[in-house]
Image: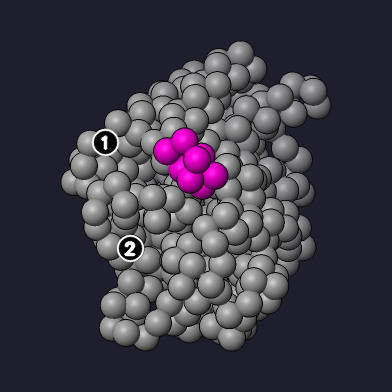
Amino acid sequence: MQHNIAMETISVLQAVGPTATATPRHRALILAALTLGGFAIGTSEFSAMGLMPEMVKTFGVSEPQVGHIISMYALGVVVGAPLLAILGGRLPRRVLLLVLMGFYAFGNLASAAAPDYLSMILARFVAGLPHGAYFGVAALSAVAISKPEERGKAVSLVMFGLTVAILIGNPIATWMGQTIGWRWAFVMVSSVAVATVALIAMFMPRDRVEAPKHPLEELRAFNRLPVWQALAIGAVGFSGLFCVFSYLAPTMLQVTNVSAQWIPLGLAGFGLGGVIGNFLGGWLFDRLRFRAVPAILLGAAAMLSLFPLTAGSLWTLLPITVAIGMLGALGPVLQTHLMDVAGDAQTLAAASHHAAFNAANALGPWLGGMAISAGWGWTSTGYVGATTAVLGALIYLWAAGTLRRPRRQACPAV
């Protein structure tokens, strides 16, 4: 049944894909432009985590309050992904990508200029709005120019920019914050976003003219149980990574007892794990399809459980951050699975995938902040994260049971 849904999805994507006849060189240039946009978004999304100590000093607030800045960006993604996907559904994909990335450049300039804590919260919410819609449309564009048996690989290439941002972009932003000021990190992101706009304008050809879908039609197609189940897996299961990652900087300062100069290296560990996990996720989906989910989540739960035991030493902390970062494998798996079960709501489902992951980005820091504020210690984030990963695996069992039903029952409206 999953195979039939996948074949129908491929037919839809290739029928409307604007670049299905692109040469290998042209395809590589398009993917590079889309990946650069992912790098800009990833650097901005995660930079507040590495810049937490500097923001605490600037705004005169606590670490959990800076965690609210992170959560407000994630809330912007949750709100903006479905909203902009619906509003932009009548635009050609090329135009929509240009608009979204231009909007992203503006949001990060506003973040750089924020004069106080409340304006920073608002600026981060605004910056998060185009995040999910961009990745959703970019993933659909990548699949449309790829071979049917390489859909997972195509999605992982788009997500590659996000993982490289954790490996390289976020440590650079942290270093900039420690040396020349945290505001320049957001100026850098805005510059990369502008460069992405230029590359998409240069290399991505114009879309075919399609009959626009009515928003209510796409909402009806979207409102099916397997779609919501996949989103729930991402929102709950992925929050464990953000729970640990969001408070890594103060954990390294307070528990590992290293100087602030080591924080970029710790963040890079998550990035290295994310890069490995990203390509692992694409490879796993092309071979196991949806069945890759429990293996990823249960492995992550084990690694998250080890985090409190390894945080006392830099040389045990760094390997575990790499292992936890590999939870990023869940991204390409769920993104591609959503394309299989979304039917005629491809754009909305692809964008909502990132809304779900940023619901995890909001949930993780919130749960971690509650545990820390309750006096459980900085390393309690590992146990909280392991619990959410296990809960995500339980949601998978429910979703897998739904997909095993006859097709007329497998995708019910909810």
Q: Is residue 268 visible?
A: yes
Magenta-span inclusion, residue 315: no
Query: In this rendering, would 277 be left or right of 223?
Result: right
Q: Quadrant of the N terminus?
A: bottom right
In which quarter of the view is residue 198 placed? top right
The type of residue carrying mark 1 is Ala
Magenta-span inclusion, residue 180: yes
Q: Secondary structure at mark 1?
A: loop
Residue at 41 percent of width and 24 percent of height: 102
> Which comes before the other along the chain, label 1 or label 2?
2
Q: Is residue 74 visible?
A: no
Residue ID for mark 2:
63
Marks 1 and 2, how far apart in space? 18 Å
In which quarter of the view is residue 325 placed? bottom right
Residue 123 x %, y %: 27, 39
In the displayed structure, 74 sits above or below 315; it is above
Q: Residues within 10 Å of mark 1 (few under 14, many from 20)?
A: some
Q: Which dot marks residue 85? A: none
In the displayed structure, 64 sits above or below 41; it is below
Q: Which dot marks residue 114? A: 1
Residue 125 x %, y %: 29, 44
Q: Secondary structure at mark 2?
A: helix
- Tell which of 175 and 80 is nearer to you: 175
Range of magenta residues: 174-181
Residue at 64 percent of width and 71 percent of height: 314
Q: Residue furthest right?
A: 24
In the displayed structure, 193 sits above or below 35; it is above
Residue at 22 percent of width and 47 percent of height: 117
